[in-house]
Amino acid sequence: MDASLSSRSARLPIPWVTTVARLVLGGVLIAAGALKIGNPSDSVLAVKAYQLLPESVAIGVGYALPIVEIVVGVLLVVGLLTRVAAVIAALLMLAFVFGIGWAWANGLRIDCGCFGGGGQLGAGQEPAYLIDILRDFGLALLGVWTVRFPPGRFALDGALGLGGDSADDDLEDL
Amino acid sequence: MGKGERATATPGAREKIKQQQAAARAQERRRRVITYTAAGVLAVAALGAGIWYGASKSQPEQAAAGLAPVTVQPDGTVVMAKSGVEKPVLDVYEDFQCPACKEAERVSGQTIKNLAAEGKAKVVYHPITIFSQEPTRSNSLRAGNAARCIADGKQWMAFHNLLFQNQPSETAEGFTNSQLVEWGKEAGVTAPDFEQCVNSGKHVQAQQSYSEKIMDEQKLTHTPTLKLNGTEVDNAVVFSPSELRDAVTKAAK
């Protein structure tokens, strides 16, 4: 009795942590996408500035990225298809970490283009690679947490009976 | 507790309950798959619609029949307009080394050419050097110099397009004189002194002083800058062929 009670109270915050992780990660993605979507060409430029992808691929990624960010962000915030969205979000963040690290290692002087902007630094501006990397890595960790403990409280997945690790968990919840 | 109760049921009833539970579970699973699929389809559709919208907004125009007459001015600017077309004036301030200028050229360059060919605008190109750091500054100056070595408008336009197509990285030396000479030939330049003009950097000084002068006069903070009758065109419009066309057409009225 005692053991099950204590394990239960220890487990209680987990869904809430997932909710917070979802809201933070989803919110950042929506903001990042929304700031880019008004000017897709800037987004294309920002991707090109990394000099990481061949031109045609960079153009496609530049156009698609803001929309992917917004859709995945919305899914996370409302908690729909939580696990899939969190996997994509975490992979995106890891890709950004890689890209920024790559730019840093190669001595490129660029703006990360994370929240809009064409990837070019203005005169006198210095890149802030470390901060960008730490932020994106932290966000990736939130994504990993959400993948491990979906869907959290206030999630459409839960309301629709889609959430949880397996069918058994769902039945327990019901 | 539950188990104890169930144990009292007859074997037949127990089977029935089991079957009912299995059926309910199967139905629940089916419902879940359908909901999940529907949500997935919705998300993918939103993605597709968004990407399609974004791509169509910056879809470059097709090349029209031909170019409006192009004339190289003594100050190194280049006018592209049908004869008699004086208004509206679309000034294009661009740097051959600037990636955003390359992108603007890729997305909206054809629209600008088409508008001039349709007699809807007088286009003035101002190739300038906006970079202050190496290697971009020297790259841009060499390219600007080479463009100034071309006197024929048609050849200049072909060279202009080639420069953007072959724009070097911002972190490496590029636009070397030998490349520039080669692209000049590709653009149809036949003038015998072209090679010498490129190699000697004959107009580097002019490129520098014109850039400084025009950046000062026009208060340019970035390239590309487009000005329509002297008023700066918003960046979002510059990079959207259809919006740019609308803005210019409206100004023509």
Image (cartoon, grey):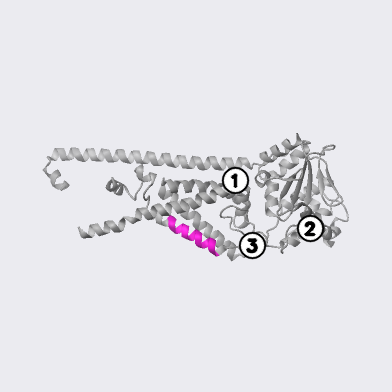
Q: How crowded is mark 3: few (under 14 residues within 10 Å), some or many (20 or more)?
A: few
Nearer to us in this view, B70 or B195: B70
**Which residue is the extreme one toward the right?**
B192
Q: Residue at x 51, y 43 (%)?
A: B47
Q: What residue type is labelled 2?
A: Glu
Quadrant where the image shows the C terminus of chain A? top left
Quarter assignment of residue B117: top right
Please state the horizontal and vertical placement of residue B180, each as a whole percent of the image. 78, 56
The dot on residue B212 is 2
Q: Distance between the residues labelled 3 and 1?
A: 24 Å
Q: Distance between the residues labelled 2 and 1?
A: 31 Å
Image: magenta residue range: A130-143
Tell me if A115 is positioned left or right of B22 in this view.
right
Residue B62 shows in the view: no
Disc 1 chain ID: A
Q: Do labels 3 and 1 share a chain?
A: yes
Disc 3 chain ID: A
Q: Are marks 2 and 1 in contact (CB under 8 Å)?
A: no
Residue under pointer 1: A38
Q: How far apart are marks 2 and 3 (CA)?
A: 21 Å
Residue under pointer 3: A125
Nearer to us in this view, A156 or B15: A156
Q: What residue type is labelled 3?
A: Gln
Please state the horizontal and vertical placement of residue B132, each as a whole percent of the image. 73, 62
Q: Are marks 2 and 1 on the same chain?
A: no
